[in-house]
Image: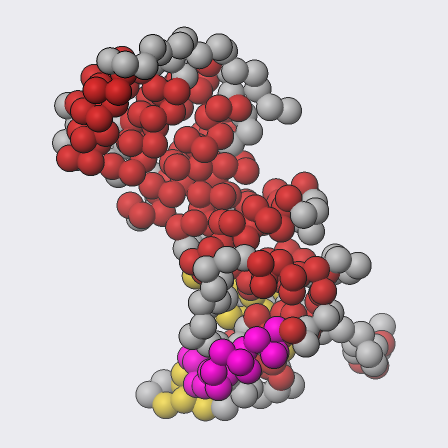
């Protein structure tokens, strides 16, 4: 095919691509140069994004605003992707690593899934990347970045070439690790995969992955669930141990969970045990029925 035949057709959308494919990457990493001027400009830009390309273009813009709820993001995805799923995985990665939504990445992913904006194939693809990578590279058009980013070139910085493409390194937060672990831990193989990856993560991200396992323990048969919760109850992070002990208690191992909690090295867990020992004097414990696996 000739040179002309390989060119993008006029009017064809330019979309982000996962991975490092930038034609301008060899010159050096990107650094933020400018941000949108205030939250109003940020909001206006997002509301005007009614196609996948437009949404992705907004999601790469640096800023400082942060949201506490995923509602605005969900509305943006509906505008851009409800009738066009092209590039939705890339849009999701850009959204959960965007300054506005890094703190609510997990509820945003849950809402996108519940609302059907992500199908099972998308969910599996996103979850796998969020578990396995520490930084996700997304390559986008230099025209999207030229007004907001500079490129480090030795001891100096230079402007980007709008005609080239560049890879953005998007760092993942612990919340999305928890979501990914819960999505991938559907069987023993999935649980083993999460555990192997957790052993290679830093302590905060590893704890998030274990909390993902605790989240889905209720969907497994009793033996498998107890094994998973017992392991989590010995994890170094106190938040993981407490979550696991609470689930063990809820599955009918109330006395055993309180005994372990009473001797735990974390004061918060010992206080939980003391409080529930008092309440258990007045509340009869009912043995939990075996759970069935979710298909």
Which residue is rendered at x = 42% and y = 79% of the image? 31
Which residue is rendered at x = 61% and y = 73% of the image? 46
Number of numbered labels in the structure image: 0
At which x and y percent is residue 156?
A: 37, 90
Q: Is residue 34 magenta?
A: yes
In this image, 153 relative to 257: left or right? right
Q: Is residue 166 visible?
A: no
Q: The magenta stretch spans which residues?
A: 31-46
Q: Quadrant of residue 196?
A: top left
Instruction: For the N terminus, give its image quadrant.
Output: bottom right
Picture layout, residue 26 above or below residue 211: below
Picture layout, residue 42 above or below residue 189: below
In this image, 193 relative to 203: left or right? right
At which x and y percent is residue 250?
A: 39, 20
Q: Quadrant of residue 283?
A: top left
Q: Is residue 295 visible?
A: yes
Which color scheme did the rendering employ for the protein? secondary structure
Residue closest to the eye, 231 or 199: 231
Q: Is residue 145 magenta?
A: no
Picture layout, residue 215 above or below residue 41: above
Which residue is rendered at x = 54% and y = 57% of the image? 70
At which x and y percent is residue 121?
A: 68, 43
Instruction: For the C terminus, give its image quadrant.
Output: top right
């Amino acid at each position: 095919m000739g040179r002309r035949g390989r060119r993008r057709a006029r009017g064809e959308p330019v979309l982000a691509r996962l991975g490092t494919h930038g034609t301008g990457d060899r010159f050096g990493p990107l650094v933020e140069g400018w941000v949108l001027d205030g939250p109003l400009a940020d909001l206006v830009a997002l509301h005007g994004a009614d196609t996948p390309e437009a949404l992705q273009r907004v999601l790469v813009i640096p800023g400082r605003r942060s949201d506490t709820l995923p509602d605005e993001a969900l509305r943006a995805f509906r505008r851009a992707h409800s009738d066009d799923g092209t590039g939705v995985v890339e849009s999701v990665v850009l959204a959960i690593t965007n300054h506005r939504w890094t703190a609510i990445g997990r509820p945003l992913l849950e809402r996108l899934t519940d609302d059907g904006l992500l199908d099972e194939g998308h969910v599996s693809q996103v979850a796998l990347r969020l578990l396995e990578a520490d930084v996700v590279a997304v390559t986008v058009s230099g025209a999207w970045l030229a007004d907001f980013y500079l490129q480090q070139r030795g001891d100096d910085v230079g402007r980007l070439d709008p005609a080239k493409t560049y890879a953005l390194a998007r760092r993942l937060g612990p919340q999305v690790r928890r979501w990914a672990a819960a999505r991938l831990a559907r069987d023993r193989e999935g649980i083993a995969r999460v555990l192997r990856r957790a052993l290679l993560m830093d302590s905060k991200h590893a704890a998030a992955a274990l909390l993902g396992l605790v989240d889905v323990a209720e969907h497994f048969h009793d033996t498998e669930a107890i094994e998973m919760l017992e392991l989590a109850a010995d994890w170094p992070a106190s938040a993981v141990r407490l979550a696991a002990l609470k689930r063990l208690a809820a599955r009918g191992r109330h006395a055993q969970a309180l005994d372990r909690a009473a001797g735990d090295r974390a004061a918060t867990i010992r206080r939980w045990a003391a409080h529930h020992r008092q309440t258990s004097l007045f509340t009869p414990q009912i043995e939990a029925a075996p759970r069935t696996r979710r298909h």
